[in-house]
Image (cartoon, rainbow, N blue to C red):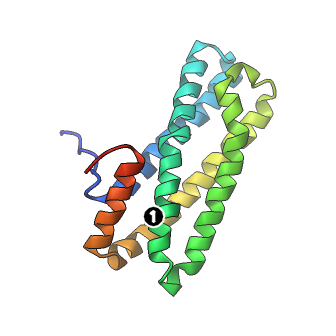
Amino acid sequence: MLPVPAPGFDQPLALLRACHERILRQCATLAKLALHVRAEGPGPEAHRAAAEVYRYFSTAGQHHHEDEEQDLFPRLRAHADLAGLLTVLAGEHRRMEVLWQQLAPMLREPDSMLNLAVFEKLVAEFNALYAAHIERENRELLPRAEQLLSEDVLRELAARMAARRGVTL
């Protein structure tokens, strides 16, 4: 069976879902990294994994939050039934950012993971928050967005997402 190609910018909501899958894979790598460092210490393999996770969440992960907060959420705020959900999701983004600010220095310098218990606790919180957040977005937010957003709005969303990444449509 051939792999299914990732959605392009012409499908912005599908692209957000695909990004969710990549985020979960990075979270899994982060969990494996914590186990690896516990068992073997912060050697070359840990440095590579830490650099990969750091790079992802510092670029693509950041773009994903911007896609939602700057482009998707504002286009859905006019719908009163989504106000509470959008507030919860934005609050979760803030908590993720706080956790990320604590994790990022450890990932930039894995040898600094001197207090492994703190790192493991942060990883567990970060991953649990992301898993619940993504599940909520996939189950509640994105299906409603598919119902509510016009083709014109989706094209605008796609253009802004592409521009954020330096891609011209």
Q: Measuring from the top left, give residue 59's x and y in whole percent.
A: 50, 40
State whether residue 89 is above or below residue 128.
below
Q: Horizontal and vertical percent for residue 100? A: 66, 43
Crowding at mark 1 (Cα within 10 Å: few <14, some 14-19, many 20+): some
Q: Is residue 25 visible?
A: yes
Residue projecting furthest to the bottom: 80
Q: Residue at x 49, y 71 (%)?
A: 74
Q: Is residue 133 left or right of residue 157?
A: right
What residue is shown at x 66% (from left), y 50% (from top)? Answer: 97
Residue at far left of view: 1
Residue lying farthest right?
Answer: 115
Tell which of 59 and 6 is nearer to you.
Answer: 59
Amino acid on which the number 1 mark rests in the picture: Asp
Q: Foreground residue, 152 or 103?
A: 152
Relative vertical location of residue 126 with respect to residue 91 in this rendering, above or below: above
Instruction: Please name the residue that numbered disc 1 is placed on.
Output: 71
Query: Of 162 and 145, which appears nearest the observer?
Result: 162
